[in-house]
């Protein structure tokens, strides 16, 4: 369902210096897989995830989602993918601090023109399914890191994506709560068949993956 073909990403700096963040990365991920990406800091993991998630563009190479090549000339189609097909989870949660948990989860539905009562119903159901029903009206600052990340996962799921991309989702959470986050993601993967691509330093996460991809210096090694 996700295929990258010869993806490279270069950053230029100063007068002609060049960093190769990704070097000729070709991977294929099937629907329903739970894939972990591991590798040292600076090896290109976030760059790869951001490109697959249409948050960034490659310098060269192509991405195919369901055999359709991403067309960077067609901004509207990329927006549609970000709104409907892909959900993102970040290390720093990235919740909106002035919105309560329910409003944070509901927010992406606003752009899909879902009516307000439906938005609230869906977000409450998702929060309840994650054991956060009692926290729906709390602001992010009133929640623990683990709770904030569960809210962020609910938000990523709210538009029924087929792919969840997560960049070090347990990186800011203590190990006990990190374990809960891993279990939650595994459960969503199992029950809903959503494909997961998770960048992690967390050995527990990698152990739970159906496949581990290792990156070094912008390349996939084994
Ligand atoms: N916006 C940017 N400008 C210049 N260099 C960047 C930028 N983003 C990432 N890099 C460089 O690309 C390489 C890969 O970065 P990244 O994908 O963030 O690695 P990882 O997530 O594995 O730590 C690093 O050398 C990093 O410094
Ligand atoms: Mg990173």
Image (cartoon, grey):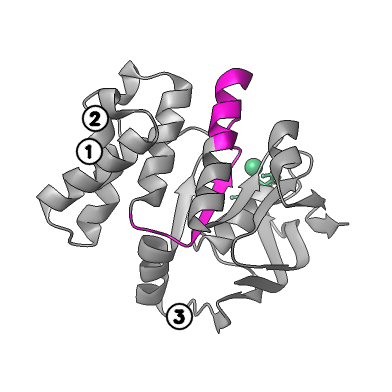
* Residue 1 lies in the magenta-colored region: no
The image shows residue 159 at horizontal and vertical percentages of 33, 57
Q: CA distance from mark 2 to mark 1?
A: 5 Å
Query: Does dot 2 land on a helix, a strand or a loop?
Result: loop
Q: Closer to the camera: disc 3 or disc 1?
A: 1
Q: Residue at x 67, y 58 (%)?
A: 12
Residue situated in front as seen by the camera: 4 or 151:
151
Q: Are marks 3 and 1 in contact (CB under 8 Å)?
A: no
Residue lying at the far right of the rendered structure: 222
Residue that numbered label 2 is attached to: 100
Residue situated in front as seen by the camera: 116 or 180:
180
Q: Earlier in the sequence, mark 2 or mark 3?
A: 3
Residue situated in front as seen by the camera: 174 or 56:
174
Residue that numbered label 1 is attached to: 103
When the figure is inspected, residue 145 is found, relative to residue 46, above or below; the finding is above
Q: Residue at x 37, y 29 (%)?
A: 131
Q: The magenta stretch spans which residues? A: 159-183
Query: Does dot 1 land on a helix, a strand or a loop?
Result: helix
- Mark identifier at residue 88: none
Q: Residue at x 24, y 36 (%)?
A: 102
Q: Is residue 174 visible?
A: no
- Mark identifier at residue 73: 3
Q: Are marks 2 and 1 in contact (CB under 8 Å)?
A: yes
* Residue 175 lies in the magenta-colored region: yes
The image shows residue 192 at horizontal and vertical percentages of 48, 55
The image shows residue 127 at horizontal and vertical percentages of 32, 36
Q: CA distance from mark 2 to mark 3?
A: 36 Å
Looking at the rendering, which quadrant does residue 175 occupy? top right
Q: Residues within 10 Å of mark 2 (few under 14, many from 20)?
A: many
Q: Is residue 41 left or right of residue 115?
A: right
User: From the Cβ of disc 3, is ligand 1 less than 8 Å away?
Assistant: no
Looking at the rendering, which quadrant does residue 20 occupy? bottom right
């Amino acid at each position: 369902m996700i295929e990258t073909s010869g993806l490279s990403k270069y950053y230029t700096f100063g007068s002609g210096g060049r960093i190769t963040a990704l070097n000729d990365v070709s991977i294929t991920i099937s629907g329903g897989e739970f894939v972990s990406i591991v590798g040292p800091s600076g090896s290109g993991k976030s760059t790869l995830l951001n490109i697959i998630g249409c948050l960034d563009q490659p310098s060269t190479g192509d991405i195919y989602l369901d055999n359709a090549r991403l067309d960077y000339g067609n901004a509207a189609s990329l927006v549609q993918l970000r709104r409907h097909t892909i959900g993102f989870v970040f290390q720093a949660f990235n919740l909106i601090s002035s919105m309560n948990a329910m409003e944070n989860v509901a927010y992406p539905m606003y752009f899909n023109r879902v009516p307000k009562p439906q938005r609230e119903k869906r977000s409450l159901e998702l929060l309840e399914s994650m054991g956060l029903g009692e926290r729906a009206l709390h602001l992010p600052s009133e929640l623990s890191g683990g709770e904030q990340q569960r809210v962020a996962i609910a938000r990523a799921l709210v538009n029924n994506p087929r792919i969840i991309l997560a960049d070090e989702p347990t990186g800011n959470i203590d190990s006990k709560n990190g374990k809960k986050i891993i279990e939650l993601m595994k459960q969503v993967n199992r029950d809903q068949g959503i494909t997961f691509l998770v960048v992690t330093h967390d050995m527990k996460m990698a152990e739970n993956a159906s496949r581990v991809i290792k990156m070094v210096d912008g390349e996939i090694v084994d």
